[in-house]
């Protein structure tokens, strides 16, 4: 057995998001979000479920905090639901919504748990979608207003802020592939949406800093190394394209390099953009987006192995498929590939030089149920997490400035278009009784956090 220790002060934590756990969808003046609308549209969520009740965290947050405390969790990443704060998207503040997060933050601090607050984890007020959502620049302006309201209310106590969770998912899953809310399929709209999401981040950062003195502010991207499926030139080009599509399209502008020229060219050639390119970009936008942040959040789940085939089902997106070897799959159908995290962290460190990196999500879906004795023996999740922790540590030895690691997720929860069919929690949730059972992985993680070290065979 080898003991691999982490630097002192390393921030171990767990992550969740509002729509996936809160429930109480109609309570205390909360407005409708695009996920309420989408999940209630037949055929959009695989098992026909929605987030109306979810883990009922809105009512059980004190118990959930006590649970975290019993596990020794010291850092908790959660998101604020915009429609609870500004039900009309902008304008009148809904005080009961704001108060909920005030109580949550106070209870966390009392339990010795530091809050990491994500402002946008996908639950856009439906009224803003009715105006066009992220395709409209006015949504970026509304986001700045919303951020300001939340940061002014919580900024004395919250000192870690994440503007957006995974802009790729917001724009591409939401507006290009139609898999997530609002479920649109229009490539040009998706690219325009991505610009407005990034712009809203850039404009919100100084506003948050002003309202929350001394705070660290950043953004979270979902990133995946893209590898060619074969040595062929065509597959290499497909991997280049895929890397541009999912990684560089977001990293480049955030770090001051503008949108990648090869991708603009690809999009023009494919007819996704007019010959003039991304016409929604106005003078000053790229400077705003490149605002210096205190950290970059990275969510890592798997790599993408890319082939040059065109996939008719993948709406307009040319020449890419994912063909990971079938040696190991999670229930999401994602390949288990810990070394991809090491590669990714080092690449981001050397190419973009973020001041600091938090792994804001990493975890795995296995549905292992409680045994007759009530214990959840999720050995595979434990191994998955252990191997990824080690991969992150290796990247740190190589210089990557990783300051913390948040396991996705504290609880089994509403996994978007997959509904409740996927269980990512280190804590089992019985959705009928709302009983929580810490899985073996949670009990093991308690030890990792306490020791600030991982033991590997
Ligand atoms: C990420 C999301 C998170 C969860 C995990 C499995 O893309 O940020 O909400 O759904 O995937």
Image (tube, rainbow, N blue to C red):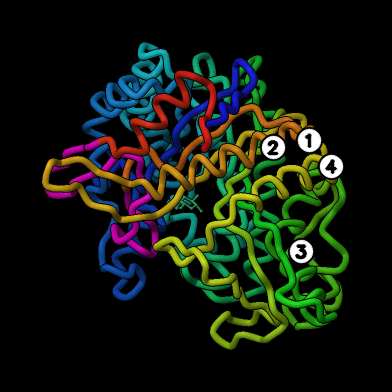
Q: Are marks 3 and 1 in contact (CB under 8 Å)?
A: no
Residue 171 image-quadrant placement: bottom right
- Does any portion of residue 110 appear in the rendered image? yes
In space, the residues marked 3 and 1 are separated at their CA atoms by: 24 Å
Residue receiving disc 1: 398
- Magenta stretch contains residue 242: no
Mark 1 falls on what kind of element?
A: loop
Circle 2: element type: helix
Q: Position of residue 23 (x, y in %)?
A: 26, 44
Which of label 4 and label 1 is nearer to you?
1
Distance of mark 4 from mark 2, alpha carbons?
15 Å
Q: Residue at x 77, y 30 (%)?
A: 355
Q: Residues within 10 Å of mark 4 (few under 14, many from 20)?
A: few
Q: Which region of the structure is painted magenta?
A: 413-437
Q: Which mark is residue 252?
A: none
> What separation in Å lies between label 2 and label 1 (alpha carbons)?
6 Å
Q: Is mark 1 within 8 Å of ligand 1?
A: no
Q: Nearer the viewer, residue 137 or 110?
A: 110
- Is the C-beta separation of discs 3 and 4 under 8 Å? no
Circle nearer the N terminus (3, 4) = 3
Give the label, 3 or 1, closer to the camera.
1
Q: Which residue bears the numbered disc 4?
A: 350
Could you say which disc has been placed on residue 394 in the image? 2
Do labels 2 and 1 touch, CB within 8 Å? yes
Cα distance between the residues tagged 4 and 1: 10 Å
In the depicted view, which residue is nearer to us: 292 or 141? 292
Residue at 39% x, 63% y is 331
Image height check: is 118 above or below 20?
A: above
Q: Which label sits on residue 244? A: 3
The CA distance from mark 3 to mark 4 is 17 Å
In the rendered structure, which disc, 4 or 2, sits on the residue that comes first in sequence?
A: 4
């Amino acid at each position: 057995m080898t003991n691999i220790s982490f630097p002192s002060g390393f921030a171990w934590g767990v992550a969740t998001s509002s729509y996936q756990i809160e429930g109480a969808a109609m309570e205390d003046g909360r407005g409708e979000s695009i996920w309420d609308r989408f999940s209630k549209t037949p055929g959009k969520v695989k098992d026909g479920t929605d987030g109306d009740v979810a883990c009922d965290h809105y009512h059980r947050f004190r118990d959930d905090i006590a649970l975290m405390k019993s596990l020794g969790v010291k850092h908790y990443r959660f998101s604020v639901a915009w429609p609870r704060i500004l039900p009309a998207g902008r304008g009148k503040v809904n005080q009961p919504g704001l108060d909920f997060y005030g109580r949550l933050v106070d209870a966390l601090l009392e339990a010795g748990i530091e809050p990491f607050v994500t402002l946008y984890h996908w639950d856009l007020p439906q009224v803003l979608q009715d105006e066009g959502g992220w395709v409209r620049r006015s949504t970026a302006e509304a986001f700045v207003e919303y951020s300001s309201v939340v940061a002014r209310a919580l900024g004395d106590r919250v000192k870690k802020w994440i503007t957006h969770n995974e802009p790729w998912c917001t724009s591409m899953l939401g507006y290009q592939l139609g898999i997530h809310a609002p479920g649109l399929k229009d490539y040009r709209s998706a690219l325009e949406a991505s610009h407005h999401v990034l712009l809203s981040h850039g404009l919100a950062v100084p506003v948050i800093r002003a309202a929350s003195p001394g705070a660290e502010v950043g953004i979270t991207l979902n990133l995946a190394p893209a590898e060619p499926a074969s040595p062929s030139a065509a597959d290499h080009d497909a991997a280049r394209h895929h890397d541009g599509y999912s990684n560089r399209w977001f990293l480049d502008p955030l770090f001051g390099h503008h949108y990648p020229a090869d991708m603009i060219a690809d999009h023009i050639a494919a007819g996704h953009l007019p010959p003039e390119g991304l016409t929604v970009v106005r003078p000053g936008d790229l400077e705003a987006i490149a605002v210096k942040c205190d950290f970059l959040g990275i969510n890592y789940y798997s790599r993408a192995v890319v082939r040059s085939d065109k996939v008719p089902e993948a709406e307009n997106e040319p020449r890419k498929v994912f063909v990971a070897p079938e040696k190991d799959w999670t229930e999401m159908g994602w390949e288990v590939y810990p070394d991809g995290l090491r590669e990714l962290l080092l690449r981001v460190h050397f190419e973009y030089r973020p001041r600091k990196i938090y792994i804001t999500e990493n975890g795995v879906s296995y549905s292992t149920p409680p045994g007759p004795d009530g214990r959840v023996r999720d050995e595979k999740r434990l191994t998955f997490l252990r191997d990824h922790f080690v991969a992150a540590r290796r990247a740190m030895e190589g210089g990557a400035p990783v300051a913390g690691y948040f396991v996705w997720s504290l609880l089994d929860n509403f996994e978007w278009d997959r509904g409740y069919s996927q269980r990512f929690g280190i804590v089992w949730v019985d959705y009928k009784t709302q009983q929580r059972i810490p899985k073996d992985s949670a009990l093991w993680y308690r030890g990792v956090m306490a020791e600030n070290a991982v033991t590997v065979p």
